[in-house]
Amino acid sequence: MAGPAAGRDSLRSDGHNAASPGIWSGGLPESWLYESWARCQVQHCLPAPARVIGPVLCQAELRQAKQRMGRMLGVALEVLEHLSGLVVPFGYVALLCDADGVVLAHRAPASLERRCRRWNLHAGAIWSEDLVGTNGVGTCLVEGRPVTVHEVQHWSAALHRLTCCAAPFYGADGRIAGAFNVTMPHPGARLAECRVLEALLAEAARRFEMTTFCSVHEGRDITLLAAAQRLSTPMIARDSSGRIVGASYAARHHPSPGERDVAAGSSDRLALSAPDVRLPDFDRAARAVIRDALAMSSGKVAPAARLLGISRATLYRRMSALELGRNHEGG
């Protein structure tokens, strides 16, 4: 297939591309690809077919991009290390990007470093949709949800050998702070691979949000409102007077009854300018979140882990590290 313009005609009525194995992000309507291509053509005025590779920041510009992310960068790098430890051994490339689509860090097998340079899978590269066209990082930031862009679904013909799975992640203020991406730098990626990667990326996004939220609101009462959404856990933070001073993305957009004012942002209940934000010792906040999850699941660890969007083993390790004890039911 020559490119996205031609690909539009080769999409079957069931919404799958005749030139690809039909890999689509779970829960995302098939129209997202058409909408992205339309933006590329009409809004971004990108030529098609094209072999577009995005620009790369100089070292000074890259330093500035990292500085703009502030203390969130340290948390994001920790999450990237965890994610890359799971995917790099399989020959995949992991990227950490900011909210503008700038790659702040990458992790890849040593054997792929030259190809990472060729495909701009390295720090300083810009993957915004308006510059590169339809791609994992740029398109997930526009859509505000995970996407998998498979080979010829990329706008740029230069990227037709790649499959990119990406998911945005949210900061403590409920805004998109960046995106994690995993790229398969070889043709023929399978649906099962992409589903596993999407799940890992969602877990990475939740991990970043929870760590950042607990860090920003360290010392405050943090309440878990419901089970984790795909990318976000509904949490609110209250100060010593009981006033809501912070709310996660899920708490703002999917509020439970009684918390509608969080989403509305009513000024008498919600104050988002948290004073004296300190670097993390957020164990107290983490304990509160875990206790809430255990209380909501009648003390059973497995359901509590599902509420938090983590594995039971991870929750046991976290409980042990926080000295919460193990006198809870496993199932």
Image (cartoon, helix red, strand yellow):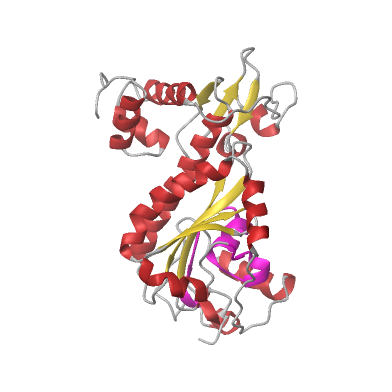
Is 140 in the magenta? yes
Is 197 in the magenta? no
Tell me the quarter of the image containing the C terminus: top left
**Relative to 163, is 322 above or below?**
above
Q: Residue at x 56, y 45 (%)?
A: 73
Residue 269 in picture, x, y percent from top left: 69, 22
Q: Residue at x 53, y 61 (%)?
A: 29
Q: Is residue 219 left or right of residue 200?
A: right
Q: Residue at x 36, y 71 (%)?
A: 111
Residue 288 in picture, x, y percent from top left: 46, 21
Quadrant in which residue 328 is drawn: top left
Count every numbered label the image shows and give the total.
0
Residue 136 in picture, x, y percent from top left: 53, 64
Q: Which residues are magenta?
A: 124-152
**Relative to 306, is 99 above or below?**
below
Q: Residue at x 39, y 77 (%)?
A: 187
